[in-house]
Amino acid sequence: MSAQDIDMQQFLFTDGAASFDCLFSMRGGYELSLTSRGENPKFFLFSVSDDFQLSTYLNGDHFANLMSVLKTHEMSTQGFSTSRFFQALDAAVPPKATKDHVPTASQILNLRHDLEERDRPFFDTWIYWKERGPQKENLKKTCTVLGPEAYAFSVKNRASSKWSAVDLGRSWG
């Protein structure tokens, strides 16, 4: 990915009757997010180490939510194995990154339920602060959607990114 100057990839993972839109991000720290498809999407975020090892720990809520997704269409999760699930996920990861699998800002915000103001996917402008700087949530959205250069700009200039629901055709740089 780095050789192609790509820092984010989107791909599909299907396990039984359940499908997940996946985002692998190298923006900031390495992360893999899974968002289930369907009426009531569930969001899962996993840390990935520098040597691309996925943190596969599922706490109580994550495990219960994953089980509810996998029981789609009343399919049984009897005999479920987290090890087999993550092996299948690993096998679904595309072996090569491509530019056409780099998500747009709207796609990122649609799939990353942990980011603020998901209904505002378009960069508008910078808000410069004299006293305080940008909030942690704003910095996370800036890095995830715009990339590490925008994040560094935000921190250096004590500026929060402002977002719009309408595409104003503006870029951050």
Image (cartoon, helix red, strand yellow):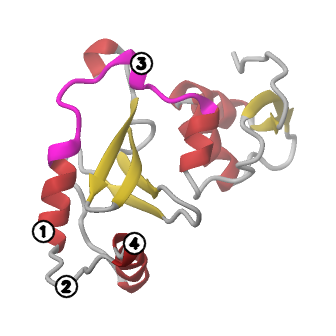
Q: What is the C-alpha distance between the residues marked 1 and 4?
A: 23 Å
Position of the C terminus by quadrant: top right
Q: Nearer the viewer, mark 1 or mark 4?
A: 4
Q: Is residue 16 above or below residue 162?
A: below
Disc 3 or 4, which lies upstream in sequence? Answer: 4
Say which element carries label 2.
loop
**Gap in Å between the C-alphas at discs 4 and 2?**
14 Å
Give me the disc on residue 73: 4
Label 3 vs 1, first from the N-terminus: 1
Q: SS for tag 3?
A: helix
Q: Is residue 88 above or below residue 70?
A: above
Pinpoint residue 84: horizontal percent, then vertical percent. 12, 65
Q: Say if 82 sits above or below 123 in the image.
A: below
**Mark 3 Cα shell of 10 Å, populated few (<14), some (14-19), many (≥20):** few
What's drawn in magenta, residue-wise? Answer: 91-105
Q: For the residue marked with disc 4, what is the amino acid?
A: His
> Going by the image, does 168 lie left or right of 87?
right
User: From mark 3 to mark 4, how far is it between C-alphas?
Assistant: 32 Å
Q: What type is the residue that disc 1 sits on?
A: Ser
Per the image, the residue denoted by label 2 is: 78
Q: Confirm or deny contact between disc 3 and disc 4 (CB under 8 A).
A: no
Amino acid carrying mark 3 in the image:
Asp
Task: Of the two numbered discs 1 and 2 on the same chain, state the one appearing first in sequence.
Answer: 2
- The residue under the point 62% across, 44% down is 109
Taking the image as drawn, is residue 51 in sight? no
Residues at circles 2 and 3 in contact by the CB criterion of under 8 Å: no
Residue at label 3?
100
Identify residue type, mark 2: Gln
Within 10 Å of the Cα at label 4, are there few (<14), some (14-19), or many (20+) other Cα atoms?
few
Residue 59, quarter of picture: bottom left
